[in-house]
Image: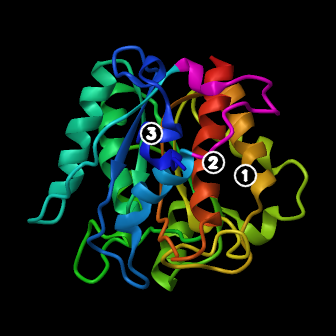
Amino acid sequence: MWNKEYWLPHNFAALAREYSDFENAKAVILPIPYEHTTSYKSGTRNGPSAIIAASRNLELYDAELKCEPYRAGICTLDELEPVSGEAGQMEGRIAEVAGWLLAEEKLPVALGGEHSLSLGLVTALAAKHNGLSVLQLDAHADLRDSYQGNKYSHACTMRRIGELAPIVPVGIRSLCRKEAEWIENKKLKIFWAQDIMNKRKWHTEVVERLSDEVYITIDLDVFDPGIMPAVGTPEPGGLDWYAVLQLLKLVASEKRIVGFDVVELSPQPGNIAPDFMAAKLVYKLLGYIFKAR
């Protein structure tokens, strides 16, 4: 008996060439198995391949949208090989590749890997889109100026991104004292997880704070570990699946999403549910974007 693993195309969603070639694709999947500054549980370097493997078992018809989003074209690039060397080198390499995708008028979709890779994407997008804003879905503030002597640590990602574009953090429920002081001094609006759980119009408030062109960075630990345990730094009290989808759908309908990433999946042997959830999240957000356009 043939195992479909041997004959399905090995790309995101197992798409035939008609829907996965670079020239015609609207979106391009960029797998980045980068893991250099992980501070708790390692394994995010295996995240991109796990998401792509799970995506090959997706049902490609979206019942909510009543369409097949893949028909807009989704190309999958080879994994971007990590760069070893001085801090910031990998971010520069990612920015270079993202800039090329933007020049080709593609929607860049990065799969991580650790959260620090988001900086490279935003660097390229901020250079192209004046007035870009960044929506951060995350359990952690990631606003340290430096962590373990590294200004490019995953714990500093949003501090560096905030130097390039305004940020709107959602789902935050963990930070250090210095981050709390910085937030207060800068008067940064945080959509704390505990504040939005039972609030009815928080999705609209988030969207109102975003500019017309938006980059979305999704650290999977924004979800409650009960449904997303496969992350490097899980935090209790996270958001649920439908709350996140409701926000993403609203952002896609009201704003122009110019790129996004899904990061920090640390696959657990024997538990494929988180991998599939991450793949489904990517496909759902692509569907919202394609439908809005």
Q: Main secondary structure of the magenta part?
A: loop
Q: Would residue 116 be found to the left or right of residue 158 on screen?
A: left
Q: Which residue is mark 3?
A: 7
Q: Which amino acid lies under the numbered mark 3 shown in the image of this protein?
A: Trp
**Label 1 with label 2: CB-CB less than 8 Å:** yes
Residue most extreme to the left: 85
Q: Which residue is mark 2?
A: 281
Q: Which amino acid lies under the numbered mark 1 shown in the image of this protein?
A: Val
Q: Which amino acid lies under the numbered mark 2 shown in the image of this protein?
A: Leu
Residue at point 59% right, 68% down? 221
Report how far apart the C-alphas of labels 3 and 1 lie in the structure: 34 Å
Residue 63, position in %: x, y?
81, 33
Q: Which is more N-terminal, label 1 or label 3?
A: 3
Q: Which is more N-terminal, label 2 or label 3?
A: 3
Start-end of magenta stretch: 57-72
Q: Is residue 222 above or below residue 76?
A: below
Q: Which residue is mark 1?
A: 244
Query: Mark 1, residues whose alpha carbon is within 10 Å: few (<14), some, or many (≥20)?
Result: some
